Amino acid sequence: IFEALEKGNHDSYNSNSCELIQYFDKLDSYIEDANLKRFESSEFSDLIKIGHGGTAVVFSANFQGKKYALKSLNIHLLVDDRNFKDIKREEKTIEFITNDINNDTEQSPANP
C-alpha cells in the first residue's frame, strides 16, 4: 500500500485503503506521543506462536538474550476506534504492571 501511494498511484485504492493509511498514521502518532520503543522484527529470534485473539497474535520471542511475549497486531482488523482504544488501554495496563514490578524489585530486601 505505502509503496504505491508514494509513487502517486492513488486511483487503485478504495476508501478502506485510505482508512487503513489514516489508521496507521493515528497509530504512529500514538506510539510517538507515548514514547513507546519500536523494534524491527529481525531483532527477534526463536519466535513461537503461543496464542491469538481478535486483534493480534502472541509469540514467545528472544530479544537481546531475554525471552519476551511479542504481540503482533492484525492490521486488517484494526480499522476502528474501538480496537484502537483497546490497544491504548492494553499498553497502559502493561506499563502500569511493568512499573509496579520494577518498583517491587527496587524495594525488595535483596535491593535495599
Image (cartoon, grey):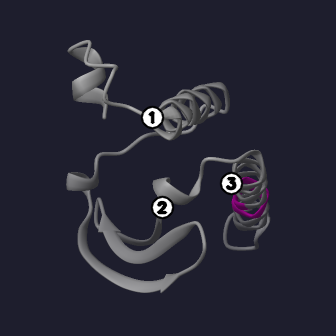
Q: From this viewpoint, which residue is outermost toward the bottom?
A: 50
- Which stretch did the figure color magenta? 94-99
The residue that mark 1 highlights is 14
Q: Earlier in the sequence, mark 3 or mark 2?
A: 2
Helix, strand or loop at label 1? It is: loop
- Give the alpha-carbon distance from disc 1 to disc 3, as whole Å: 25 Å
**Residue at 48% of width from left, 61% of height from top?**
74
Secondary element at image label 3: helix
Res. 101 image quadrant: bottom right
Q: In the image shown, does 29 or 38 lie closer to the viewer?
A: 29
Quarter of the rendering occupied by the N terminus: top left
- Discs 1, 3 touching: Cβ within 8 Å: no
> Residue 19, percent across and down?
56, 34
Marks 1 and 3, the one that precedes in the sequence = 1
The residue positioned 37% from the left and 83% from the top of the image is 49
Magenta span has 57?
A: no
Q: Amino acid at mark 1?
A: Asn
Q: Give how far across and how far down residue 77 sits, in percent.
A: 56, 59
Q: Please name the amino acid that badge 2 sits on.
A: Asn
Task: Name the amino acid type tagged 3.
Answer: Ile
Mark 2 lies on residue? 74
Of residues 68 and 18, the one nearer the viewer is 18
Left or right? Give the position of 29 relative to 57.
right
* Residue occupied by mark 3: 87
Answer above or below: position of 54 versus 98. below
Determine the CA span between mark 2 and mark 1: 20 Å
C-alpha span from label 3 to label 2: 12 Å
